[in-house]
Image (cartoon, rainbow, N blue to C red):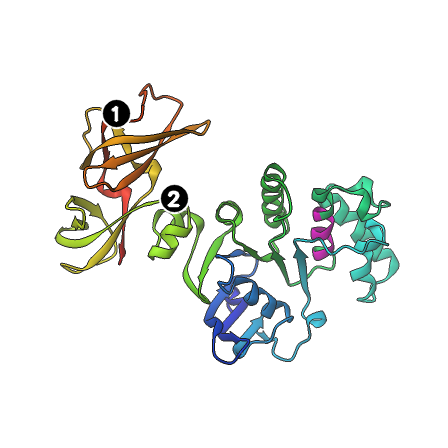
């Protein structure tokens, strides 16, 4: 068996009413030791997919396997899966040590080995000093560390995490994102992670599956998702972008001429093939747009500054073009001496490699 197919969803459907599919013909292979994130808005099917893998929901059709073993008739407690939830789900009447001992005890592991495993896992999550405390005596971040430790102490085949950091404040969430990422790298466990937070998905994952209306729109490493979104939905959901619609009006090698609906002509480089007169969306990230005094960029636009928003390390500039459409640019505050003010005229530009072509 190929390790690239350690966890497999094959033609999986899920419907609650027999008519509408919450998960629609899901085919997904996850490698052993991979950190895969299911990312998407509420109702996109990501949590339902996770719950089917855990055994809390049954597929309406299709098969789910771990290491080649079909999970069809295997109850949740026999799947050897660790789970981490947003609400921690720790036993309030037990100490931290007892919480970690519990999954080992129900697996009939001997006391000496249980003690050793609990000691080791507390060391891994840097919570050695808290073994005798009750969950109510811990902060939210500490409770989440213990929930994570409990999910991996019995050496599961796969660890599932459902929005585990959603209840924490921004700084702690970002700190724990890196902690979970480093823990995954150190232990080599297979992780399936669910979130609607795009920055979390980009920070932590080996690959991200972007869900929309029960289907995966794109499955790719974070950098590829961000730099080369395959669909209009992915481009809009992952990060900010400016979108201009139009049609292909010519080609020279891998560079396409696009005539936009607003009357602009631009050149966009693309490895994907497009036909003449095909309807397309040109997607340009705000940080790719250069504010030009004397622009040498291939694609150039004149406009008027509508709004300048100061955000610490950068400014967001809203620029109104002659056709009344608005482009958003990000200008770093370090290393730029341009002083931008509302109503000021300016030139914007980007090169052919700075935009992405997407079928409309």
Q: Which of the 4 image quadrants contains residue 76?
A: bottom right
Precedes in sequence: disc 1 or disc 2: 2
Q: Can the viewer see residue 124 in this picture?
A: yes
Q: Can the viewer see residue 230 in this picture?
A: no
Q: Which residue is drawn at 19% across and 53% down?
A: 246
User: Residue 183, how many percent across, how many down?
Assistant: 63, 47
Q: Which residue is drawn at 17% across and 55% down?
A: 247
Q: Name the residue tied to disc 2.
A: 240
In screen coordinates, is 135 left or right of 276?
A: right
Q: Is residue 148 magenta?
A: yes
User: Residue 140, how many percent across, how many down?
Assistant: 71, 44
Q: Residue at x 34, y 45 (%)?
A: 241
Secondary structure under tag 1 reads loop
In screen coordinates, is 311 left or right of 323?
A: right
Q: Residue at x 19, y 25 (%)?
A: 294
Which of discs 1 and 2 lies nearer the camera? The answer is: 1
Residue 344 numbered mark, or none: 1
Magenta segment main secondary structure:
helix
Q: How crowded is mark 2: few (under 14 residues within 10 Å), some or many (20 or more)?
A: some
| Residue nearest the viewer, comparing 31 with 57 | 57
User: Residue 79, how many percent across, how many down?
Assistant: 67, 70
User: Residue 168, how many percent across, how many down?
Assistant: 64, 44
Q: Which of the 4 image quadrants contains residue 318?
A: top left
| Residue nearest the viewer, comparing 253 with 268 | 268
Numbered range of the magenta stretch:
144-151
Q: How crowded is mark 1: few (under 14 residues within 10 Å), some or many (20 or more)?
A: few
In screen coordinates, is 71 left or right of 271?
A: right
| Residue nearest the viewer, comparing 241 with 178 | 241
Secondary structure under tag 2 reads loop
């Amino acid at each position: 068996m190929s390790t690239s197919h350690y966890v497999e969803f094959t033609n999986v459907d899920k419907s609650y009413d027999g008519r509408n599919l919450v998960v629609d013909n899901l085919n997904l292979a996850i490698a052993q030791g991979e950190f895969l994130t299911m990312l998407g808005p509420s109702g996109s099917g990501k949590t339902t997919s996770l719950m089917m893998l855990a055994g809390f929901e049954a597929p309406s059709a299709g098969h789910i396997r771990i290491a080649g073993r079909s999970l069809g008739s295997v109850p949740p407690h026999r799947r050897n899966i660790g789970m981490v939830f947003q609400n921690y789900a720790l036993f309030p009447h037990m100490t931290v040590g007892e919480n970690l001992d519990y999954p080992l005890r129900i697996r009939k592991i001997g006391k000496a080995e249980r003690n050793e495993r609990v000691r080791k896992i507390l060391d891994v999550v840097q919570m050695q000093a808290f073994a005798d405390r009750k969950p109510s005596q811990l902060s939210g971040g500490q409770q989440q560390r213990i929930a994570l430790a409990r999910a991996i102490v019995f050496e599961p085949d796969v660890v599932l995490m459902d929005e585990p950091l959603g209840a924490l404040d921004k700084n702690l969430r970002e700190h724990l994102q890196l902690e979970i990422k480093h823990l995954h790298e150190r232990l080599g466990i297979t992780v399936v992670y669910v979130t609607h937070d795009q920055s979390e998905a980009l920070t932590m994952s080996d690959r991200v599956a972007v869900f929309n209306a029960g289907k995966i729109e794109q499955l790719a490493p974070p950098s590829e998702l961000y730099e080369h979104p395959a669909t209009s939905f992915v481009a809009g959901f992952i990060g900010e972008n400016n979108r201009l619609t139009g049609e292909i009006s010519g080609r020279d090698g891998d560079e396409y001429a696009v005539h936009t609906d607003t009357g602009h002509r631009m050149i966009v480089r693309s490895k994907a093939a497009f036909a003449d007169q095909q309807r397309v969306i040109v997607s340009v990230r705000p940080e790719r747009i250069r504010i030009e005094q004397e622009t040498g960029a291939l694609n150039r636009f004149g406009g008027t500054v509508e709004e300048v928003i100061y955000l610490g390390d950068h400014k967001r500039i809203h620029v109104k073009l002659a056709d009344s459409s608005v482009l958003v640019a990000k200008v770093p505050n370090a290393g730029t001496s341009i002083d931008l003010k509302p109503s000021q005229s300016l030139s914007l530009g980007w090169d052919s490699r700075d935009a992405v072509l997407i079928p409309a």
